[in-house]
Amino acid sequence: MDQPTALNLPPVEPLPEGTAKFFAICEEKLGLVPNVLRAYAHDIDKLNAFSAMYNDLMLGESGLSKLEREMIAVVVSAENRCFYCLVAHGAAVRQLSGKPELGEALVMNYRVAALEPRQRAMLDFAVKMTRASGEIEEGDRQALRNAGFVDADIWDIAAVAGFFNMSNKMASAIDMRPNPEYHGQFRQGRF
């Protein structure tokens, strides 16, 4: 199988039982092991730390829907021009929304997407955080409250945006390559 990055960091062999089980679940549920996980598999402690943070932010309890969290991932990744995350999380937006055009709009320019005011406010905040986090002030947080978010949601918006800013920069630096399967997923009609 091709290298998931430009670095020559082979996975730990054999994979620990828990990691092998996790990868088998990925294969079963997704039909693939995401290359981001394969890339981290050279150091199981790093893989576990990355996976724990991702699972908490993207799958844990939150006032944000899974789709909203994926939308943040795509818009932050678009700002950072992260090929891996745009491809992988663009597919997730297409899947969760049932609207291929939404995934494409978010990749290109979220401002042209048909968004609810709540979603627009959330993405505006994530973009400002990505571009100029030091310029965020109380008015920016208040705009989120005015759109219906509570303070715990604002934390989650910032945490997801922060995580993808880190992940995007890492993925770009090591030339993390998206799984080919992502490119064609969830592009036909509504689901």
Image: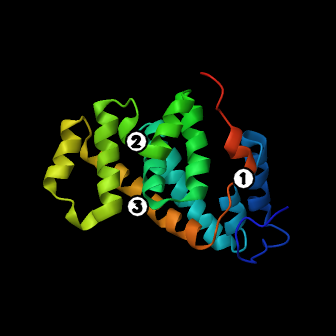
- In the picture of the structure, the residue carrying the numbered disc 3 is 162
Instruction: Name the mark nearer the viewer: 2 or 3.
Output: 2
Residue 170, quarter of the rendered image: bottom right
Question: Between residues 75 and 154, which one lies in front from this camera angle?
Answer: 75
Q: Residue 114, how many percent across, how many down? A: 39, 29
Which residue is drawn at the image coordinates 36% and 31% (left, top)?
A: 115
Position of 12 compared to 94: left or right?
Answer: right
Question: Between residues 65 and 88, which one lies in front from this camera angle?
Answer: 88
- In the picture of the structure, the residue carrying the numbered disc 1 is 179
Which residue is drawn at the image coordinates 72% and 42% (left, top)?
A: 30
Instruction: Name the mark nearer the viewer: 3 or 1.
Output: 1
Above or below, comparing residue 35 to residue 7 in the picture: above
Q: Earlier in the sequence, mark 2 or mark 1?
A: 2
Query: Callout 2, which amino acid?
Result: Tyr
Point out the residue furthest to the top here.
190
At mark 3, the secondary structure is helix
Structural crowding at the residue carrying mark 2, measured as other residues with C-alpha within 10 Å and reported as few (<14), some (14–19) or many (≥20):
many
Residue 79 visible within the image: yes
Tag on residue 110? 2
* Quadrant position of the N terminus in the picture: bottom right
> Disc 2, disc 1: CB below 8 Å?
no
Which residue is drawn at the image coordinates 76% and 54% (left, top)?
A: 23
